[in-house]
Image: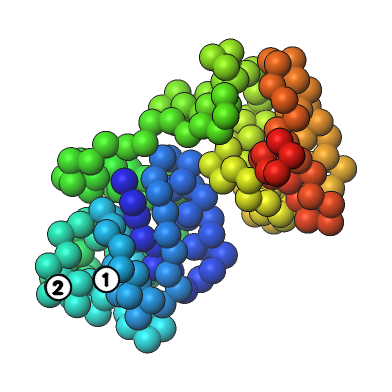
Amino acid sequence: MRILIAEDDKRLAKMLRLHLERAGYQVDVAHDGLEAIEQCQTFRYDLLVLDWMMPHKSGIEVATELRGERFEGGILMLTARDTEIDLVHGLDSGADDYLVKPFQANELLARLRALSRRQKKAFVSTVSYQELELDITTQTISYAGQLLELTRREFEFLSLLLRRPEQVMGRELIIEVVWGIGADITDNALDALVRLVRKKLDAAGAPALIQTVRGFGYRLGGPHA
């Protein structure tokens, strides 16, 4: 199932993308209303997550225009407005549901699951690279069928790399995903976590899949993996 997030706050958009990808969605991002419309005219999306207040075109304008072009996917509106007249206006524009900021990631996922049931589309249940596999339903990772015994942080780190194989993940991004935004974590703590994950992969018979990209971060696989 493919989702477009239209959100001009780039930090929030990045974190929403990570949460949704972790839940099994394929996710693209737009940072203003015009870009959102252009992407919807280019690609087919099952669900849209639209911020109400965006540059160039608001979420309301985007929803109205896309519904006029017969977009049939689900639309969830993100808004700081919580008065009844605003919310009615949002729904009348073509949105199926709304979520008032600030909100928890679990609430967002619940709303999207409800919309996806209406779309009658199946979630991606697994993500794999070579013989390494993430089961999204059970939140487990295995290598060649052997379940890896991972701590929560080890799982978050490895699943982040697994969702974007051969793509370099920066240290700051990894720390935000594994420990949380604003966490006071040193590079040494991250490197220690990576060593533990590598040790468990090695014990399972996996090759050296996690590569260090000096001065930036880590990636799963690559030219020499």
Characterize the local packing of mark 2: few (<14), some (14-19) or many (20 or more) Cα atoms within 10 angstroms: few
The three-letter code of the residue at mark 1 reads Gln
How far apart are labels 1 and 2 at the CA level? 9 Å
Residue at 12% across, 67% down: 70
Relative vertical location of residue 52 with respect to residue 18 in this rendering, above or below = below
- For the C terminus, the quadrant is top right
- Which is nearer the eye, 80 or 78? 78
Residue lying farthest to the bottom in this orientation:
56
Q: Are marks 1 and 2 in contact (CB under 8 Å)?
A: yes
Kindly indicate the quadrant of the structure image that contains residue 23.
Answer: top left
Image coordinates of residue 17 in percent, x first then y, are: 48, 54
Residue at 12% across, 75% down: 68
Position of 11 with respect to 22 (left or right) is right
Can residue 28 be seen at all in this image of the molecule? yes
The three-letter code of the residue at mark 2 reads Glu
N-terminal-most mark, 1 or 2:
1
Position of 79 with respect to 116 (left or right) is right
Can residue 160 be seen at all in this image of the molecule? no
Look at the numbered disc 1 and give the secondary structure of its residue. helix
Image coordinates of residue 118 in percent, x first then y, are: 16, 45
Residue that mark 2 sits on: 69
Kindly indicate the quadrant of the structure image that contains residue 73.
Answer: bottom left
- Which is nearer the eye, 78 or 8? 8
Image coordinates of residue 8 in percent, x first then y, are: 47, 74
Residue at 79% across, 50% down: 213
Image coordinates of residue 119 in percent, x first then y, are: 18, 46
Position of 77 with respect to 17 (left or right) is left
Residue that mark 1 sits on: 41
Residue lying farthest to the right in this orientation:
188
Kindly indicate the quadrant of the structure image that contains residue 43.
Answer: bottom left
Residue at 54% across, 14% down: 145
